[in-house]
Each structure stands twice: as C-alpha cells, then as structure tokens.
Image: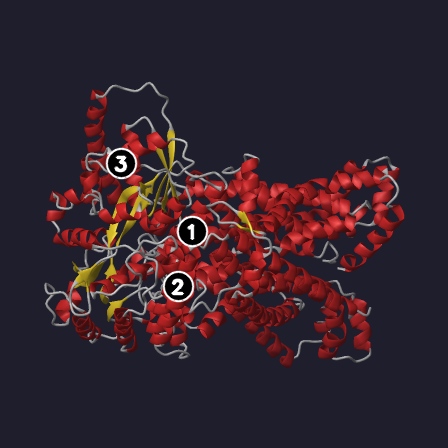
Amino acid sequence: METLRNRPAETAVKMRNRAWRLPSRRQLAGLFFVLPAVTFTLLFFIIPLLMTIWMSLHDWPLIGTPSFIGSGNYDTLAADRQFWTSLGFTIRYTLLVTPPIFILAFVLALLVNLPLRGVGLFRTAYFIPVVIGLGASSLLWVWLLNDRVGPFNTILRQLNLLQGSLVWLGSFDTALFAIIVSVVWKTVGFTMVLLLTGMQAIPQEIYQAAMVDGASYLGRLRHITLPLLRPTIALALVLSVIGSFLAFDQFYIMTRGGPRNQTITVVYWIFNNSFTYFKMGYGAALSLVLMGFLVILSMLQLRLLHREISY
Amino acid sequence: MTAHSLFLGRSLTWRRLVSRLLLYLVFISLAVIFLFPITWSVITSVKPPAEAAAIPPTGLPSRITWDNYLKLNEFGAGAGRYLFNSISVSVMTVVGTIILSTLAGYGFSRFSFPAKGALFLMILATLMIPFQSILTPLFLILTRLKLQNTLPGLALVYITFQLPFGVFVMRNSFDTVPRELEEAALLDGCSSVSLLYRVMLPIVLPGIITAGIYAFLNAWNEFLAALIFMNQQSMFTFPILLNSVNTGLYGAVDWGALQAGVTISILPSILMFLVLQRYYIQGLTGGSVKA
Amino acid sequence: MKRLSRHARIIAVLAILLATLALSLPSSAQEPVTIAFWSRDSAAALVQSLADAWNATHDNQIEVTLIPAAEYITKLGTAIAAGEPPDLLAIDLIYVPQFAAAGQLTEISELAAGLPFFDTLSPSHIRLATYEDGLYALPFNAEASVLLYNKDLFRQAGLDPEQPPTNWQEIYDAAVAISALGEDIDGFYFSGACAGCNAFTFLPLIWASGGDVLNEDATEATLTDPMVKAALEFYRQMWTEGLMPETALVDAGAEFLSAFFSGKIGMMGSGAFSISTLKNEHPEIDFGITFLPGKEGGVSSFAGGDSIGIPAGSKYPEEAFEFIEWVLSDEVQLEMFARTASLPVRTDLAENKYFEEDPRLITNAQAMALGRTPYSLVYNQLFNDSNGPWLAMIQQAVFDGQIDEAIANAQQQFTEIMAQVQD
C-alpha cells in the first residue's frame, strides 16, 4: 500500500531530471517489460476510448449513418431527467451498500484473525460467494427470493418472521434491500480478505507494547488497528465505490430497472441508450461524463484518506 | 498465527470456555448463512424437475436425478460445446494475464523509465469506464484485426480488463522482493530476463496465482462481451446458455435447469479457489504475511 | 427425448419427400455454402427442426445461432454496426420497419412477388415488412394472442368450461368464482413486469373495445382513448381484489407461461405457443382457448411472430431466399408447422388436417387472421422496452392505482419518442 503513495512522486522527480537524456539501457529494459501490457491497454482501452469521445460528438445511431452534432449530446444530457435520477439513485445505492460491506467485512476480518482452531475453514466459507459471477449470483437470488418457488419466504414463514408471501422485488424498498443483501453476500468476503491482510501486516510489537500499557481489546482496535489499516481501507474503499458506481448486472437481472423504473443505475441508462434505443453517440457522452465523475471521485477518496495517515 | 498472545497463555477457565463456545456458534451460524444459497441451489439442481419447480418449495429431494443437467444439453449447440468454449477462453485469459501482468509488474517495480507513472495510471484507468460503453468500438477493432468471432479475440479483451488488477498485484509482489537478492544475482552476471525467471518468479508466485484466479473468474463468468463478439452459437460461452435458460423458452422458466446451470457455473470456480486459496491470501498482501 | 424422436421421424419423412424432388431437378454445379441464420432462443425448437430438415436434403447448409431473446436486438444492432450481420435472420415482426428504414435489410419485393402463394401470406407480417412501398421480409412464424383458461378450474367453480368469457364482466365474474376456490388459486394472471407480454395480451383488450393507442397512420399517440382507461381500470380492479397472484408484480416474462403450469391460474392472455407446450409438458392440465374480448364484447388479437429477412450485408442473399421459399412451401407449412401445433403463416393453410383434430388451434389461427399489429419505427422504445412508457403506464395504473397520471405520463412520453422519428 505504501508504494501506491510514494511511487508517482518518486517517478516525477526522476522524470524531471532525466527528461532531456536518451533512455539508458536499463530504462529501455524497463520499457520492454511493460510494453506488452501497455500495448494491450492502448489497443483495447485507449483507442476505444478515443472512438467513444469521437462518437459522443455525433448523432450516432447504432444501425444508421452518423452525423456530427458537436456538443449536442452533452446539451441533451444536461436536460435528461432520467440521467440525473439515475445518477442520484446510483449515489444512493453506493452510500447504502458501502457501509454494510465495510462494517461486516471488518467484523469478519477480526473474527477470522482470532487464534482459534478451524478459523481458516470459516474464512474460506465467508469468501466463497466472491468467486461466483455477478450474473450467476443475481440469477441465484432471483430464485431464492421468488415468492412461490424460492426458499426464502418459506424459511421466513417457518421462523414466524413473515405471514403470507412477500414479493421482494415488487416494491422499491424491499427490492433495493434485497439487492443490497445479495451484493453484500457476494462481495463482503473480498473486502474481508483485503482488511485481513492489512491487519496481519501490522507488527505484533505495537500490540504487545500497548498491552504492557494496559490497553483493552477495544482500545487497541481503536488506536492501533484502525489507524494502521487506513491505507488498506483506502484501497478497498476505492475499489468498492468504483464497483458500486458501475453497478449494472444485478439490476439488469434482478429488477430490470423496476419497479416503476426506480432502480435504473447510470450504467443501466447508458446500456439502454446505446443498445435499446440505438443512440450510440448519446450513450458515449453519458459514459464519458460518468468516467470523469469516477476519476474525480477516486482521486478525492485517495487524497482524503492519504492526508490523514499520520505514521 | 500472530495474535496468539492475545488469547492463549492463560489457563482455560469456565468463563473462557463458554465464550469460546459462543464464538464458535457465531462462526458456524455465519458460515451457514453464507453457504446456504449455494448449497440449496446445488441440492435443487438434482431434484426431479417437478420438485424443483414445486410451489411452495419442497425440502430435500425425494430422489437424486440428473434430469435438469440433461435438459441443459438439449439447448442450442449443447452444454458441452459452451463449456468447452468457456474453458478455452478462460485458460487463454489466465495465461495471457499472468504473462503480461508479471512482465509489467516487474517493469513497474524494478525499473525507472520515462512516463512510468503515466503508463501505470493509464492501465489502472481501465477500471473507470463502464465496459458496456466501449463495447461497440471494441467490436469494430476486433473486426478490423479479423479477430471477431474467435475465442482468442475475446480472450484479448478479457486480458486487457484484467490488467489493472493483475499489474497492481504483481507490482506489489515484486516490491516485496529484497533488493539485495536482485543485486547479488546481477553481480553473478544474470540478465534481467533470467533474473526474473530464476530468482524472482518463485517469490512472486502467490501474486501470480492471485492474478490468475481473478482472470479466471472474470473470463468464466462474463456474459455481454461474449455474446456481442461471437457470431456463431458454436462459439458461445456458458453464461450465454445460462441466460437463455433463465429467459425461459416461450415464457416458461425451468427452475430445475436454471439451478443446474447455476451449479455448473459456480462449482469450477469454487474448486479452483479451494485448491489455490493458500497462495491467494498471500498474493493479495504482496507476500508480506508471515504465515 | 420423446420430442427428439418425433423430430427425427418428421425429418425422415421430409428427407425422402424432398430427396425425390431434388433428384428430379437438374443439379447445380455451384459449391455448397453455409448460411448463417440467427433467431431468438424462444423459437429454438421450430428453428432447429427446420434447419435439420433443410440440411438433410440440401447442399447449402443452414447454420443456426440462437440468441437470448432479451439481448437479440442488442446483438443484431452491434453486429450490423461492425459490418458482421448474419446471412439470414428471423426477427420479431414489429422490428422490421426500424431495420428496413435504416437500410439494413435487403429489399425482396420482386423475388417475393414471384412466389405462387404470395397473396396468401400473413397480412400482418406483410404490412409490417413493407417500408416505403418496398418489401423487406416475409413471414416466418406466427403468434396470435388469445385467452388461455383452465377448464378444470372452470368446472370446480361451477362455470361452464365450454362457455368461456366473451366480455370483461364475464372474465371478472369467472375470476371471482375461481379465486374463491382456494387461497393459492387465482382467477387471472398477467406478467406485470414484462413490456412485450402486455403489448401482446393487453392491447387486444383495448382494440376489441374499439379503442387504440396510436392513430390510424401511427403518427400520434392516443392513450387518452377512454377504452385505455377502462382496460386499466379492469386490471386494477382484479389486482386490488386479489384475483391475481402477487408474483404478477415482478414477472418480467420468465413466467409468462409457466405460471399456468401450476394448474392454479384460471385465465390469462397467451399465444399459440402455449398449446404445444401445454400438450407436451403438462398433459394433466385441461385447458381451453378463446378470443381476447372487448369491454362489451367483440374480439381482437395481437398478430405477432417473427419475420424472416436477408440483412443488407448477407454473403449469400440468393441462397438465403431459397430457404425462405422452402419454409413457406406447402409441405413445410403443413408437416413442420401445423403438425407441431405451430400456426402456418399462410392463410390458405390455416385450416388443415392437423388443426381439425384440435379446435383450439383453429381458434388461434382465426385470431391470427383478425389480429392487428402496431406499425412504428420506434416500437421498441414505445412498447417493448422494460423501462419504457408502455410498461410504466400499466404498472402505475394497475399496481399503484394512479390511472389518470399513468395515462398522462405515457401519452406525453409516447409523443416525445414519436417526435424523434417524425423529423
């Protein structure tokens, strides 16, 4: 994690010093090693990205002839109610899904970090949903939640938590709740492992010193674990927020954007415009705005969390 | 284990025994919650079709049958074909991701060269765009390269989108390799390439496995690009079959077949993870965990 | 497995029939080609059996690719954008105007006019396949919406299973009687989160009552038609009185038919596909088929199905047309369509020996003949989009009870979307 912070600065300094020189043999070797990855990224990310920018300046029907309209798509975007509603919903979803993931992941990481027999087995159990694809997991949950053939309602009825039947995906609140539960179930293991590795990297001596001073378990948690875990949390948070912002599959499969179009995320709206309404140019403009938003958001998060690192 | 001192060392009193039991109870109930959905899906997949679609759902199967799995095979080019394609494209993606990430991770960790920071950020930026929005440009590029409708073409795209994670993990892995080791080898006259191959690879193996696992999971589960880039059903991958089962032929979703499909799509990932998980956790930390 | 062996028999019969035919014709010296044929997966059984039969008897081969129905238009659109269309495609008839207008389908007016049975082809398909006086596709398969009802439940509820409802009041009364049979039995069902299903089964209720949602030449939305409101109120009443299962709320089409399989649904709108599926997979259910009625009587139907056309970029347009011609021939229409309870797409074959054995199929064929289909270049955005105004209106009206707002919203959005193609 430490490297994430230091490297760019270090590189910048070197670049300033060496910009006017020809690259040395060793520098060429370095370039040679990163070349394949850079080529792939250029070919399958940067070029498509440039094409997307080009498309965004056109009225570009998927199956017709494009015509240049300059900033037309961006003007449409500003007045597109559904886009802003979708952005609002996506932010709301991100704000709602992130805390449970992090709180649960933190508790799980603390639990599986305990020196108990068989703890590795439990760690594996909590992680297993991570390996399932989001598509398969969404299909799985549609079935689990189905009010007639799915097992959840039956179980809830037997536990006397439910009477009659509940159509989970039928109203906004229960649908959003169900999706959040399914996403937490599927992703919490990943964050747990990230936090766990961070915890295990904290030197034991610090804890021992604190215990000598008579610090309680909670005190050690608050004054040692949490602050030292901050870089790991930053990484996990950035990954998790990006993932939530790009959420699509779970809504496409579980709610189809419903009920009453209340769960259309930004990516869902991009997908609809590009591939259902065949407005590729407008879809491209939406994508670029979303990408800009994500870049800024990620930089803000990293900066905020870095400044507070005091050790 | 590092935190032994916190819990052991003192004699086991009754109070500690009770709290230990409670703790295990928490552990076990959490495990049940986490594993229930998958387990129930697997159990349902071997129920007779009528039981799998029963309203309300039945408990354990009255007998075990493979009918639901056989039904998957009746569809399109047959489940075997879709599975074969999925395996091929996943293997290619894993191999490609490992090679590219290892090379790039080594380069970014151990060398300085012009525009290094910018190139690293460029690779990471791949994470920031919704994949759906560059789907059409990607398709155009693959067509230009005559790679549309080929599994290697699909794998190339998958590899690119695995690079941010792969390169990041591998750079961290290489960062943890002691400099002295490298310098000693260089003094012995090792070239950069043989240094990487002979000295570093064994040390960064956990990172490689981590990057590989992720590449596999993504290639194995991806749906949309596989559907768009492939033009023949003989080239389709398993997630496309799974999606068709869920759509339900003529509006009649086959719940048993759906669970069979979900099971097939989940089990290989779980098995692979169980086999490799020892390296995986290490790989994420960049090898810094003292086990 | 039973299904396969039946297909095998049909193929064998056809093989002999067509082999003799082929032998009597002069053979062409051309190299055989492989024609890529795309279809949505919901038509899998028919498409596969047709391709197998053709391939067994012809040098040119048909290679079928089945695409998940929900992503069919996405897949087709991107393939066309990348210059990689198939050689031949089956496509929901309502999309033909959009693809023809974009210049993505080959005009086949002259070839089609040469077909001896051209005048007998399904009129709805031909109307939708016509764009600015040119013809761009021919009928492939037909689906007409009808009212499907469970005769056993009718009997149990003291209703006459041979006297199905002929107006909304009778549907309502029957639904009340059937729902009273038990807590888990419901009188009526519709897929409340499925846009396409409700164009198919809900529009005809409006049409049969003399109303419509688009004007004559489909340039204006007419959702303010009183019959639209009446139809929404009709569903709303059945929903609030619990005559439908709650699961209707979220069914995006996956249970469009399987809901009926449970034997606990009294009536629902459906299509011809339900007949063969029910007969094959649920012989225990005694079901009837009748027309979708209007408020005070009258009948209508949505004449749907797929058209078959040749993309502008097809590598083998002539060979592809030979397949189309074959599909529409008497033998295939009778032995491969009618025999498997699929509607023939030729009106002169609507009455045939296979259908005479099952009057329910005759009803369906008649529904096809009297059926209607909206013609719009933005059909997808208006009706088929899960997030579009059509479904939004039905949901807001039926489930939330805000009927007037729902209609006003939909009218406004229909108008906005239709304005995009006017200029």
Report the side of C339 relative to A96 (left or right): left
Q: Are marks 1 and 3 on the same chain?
A: yes
Q: Locate residue B176, reporting x and y percent.
A: 78, 52
Which quadrant does the C terminus of chain C fall into?
A: bottom left
Q: Report the disc number at residue C415.
A: 2
Q: Are marks 3 and 2 on the same chain?
A: yes
User: Which residue is disc 1 drawn over?
Assistant: C71
Say which element carries label 1: helix
Q: Which one is in front, A224 or C327?
A: C327
Q: Locate residue C243, reporting x and y percent.
A: 25, 73
Q: Are marks 1 and 2 on the same chain?
A: yes
Mark 1–mark 3 distance (CA, rounded to whole Å)? 29 Å
User: Up-down: is C140 above or below C216?
Assistant: above
Q: Locate residue A64, reporting x and y percent.
A: 47, 45
Q: Which one is in front, C276 or A58?
A: A58
Residue at the far front in the pictured view: C423
* Disc nearer the start of the sequence (3/2): 3
Residue C257 appears in the picture as rendered: no
What amino acid is labelled 3 in the image? Ala
Report the side of A302 relative to C333 (left or right): right
Count neighbours of disc 3 (C-alpha within 10 A) and say few if under 14, some if 14 to 19, many if 20 or more. Answer: some
User: Which residue is disc 3 drawn over?
Assistant: C112
* Disc nearer the start of the sequence (1/3): 1
What amino acid is labelled 2 in the image? Thr
Q: Quadrant of residue C229?
A: bottom left
Which quadrant does the N terminus of chain C fall into?
A: top left
User: Up-down: is C273 above or below C315?
Assistant: below
* Mark in the foreground, 1 or 2: 2
Q: Locate residue C219, reporting x and y percent.
A: 34, 58
Q: Which one is in front, B260 or B250?
A: B250
Judging from the image, mark 3 belongs to the subunit labelled C
Kindly indicate whether the residue at mark 2 contacts the one at mark 1 (C-beta within 8 angstroms).
Answer: no
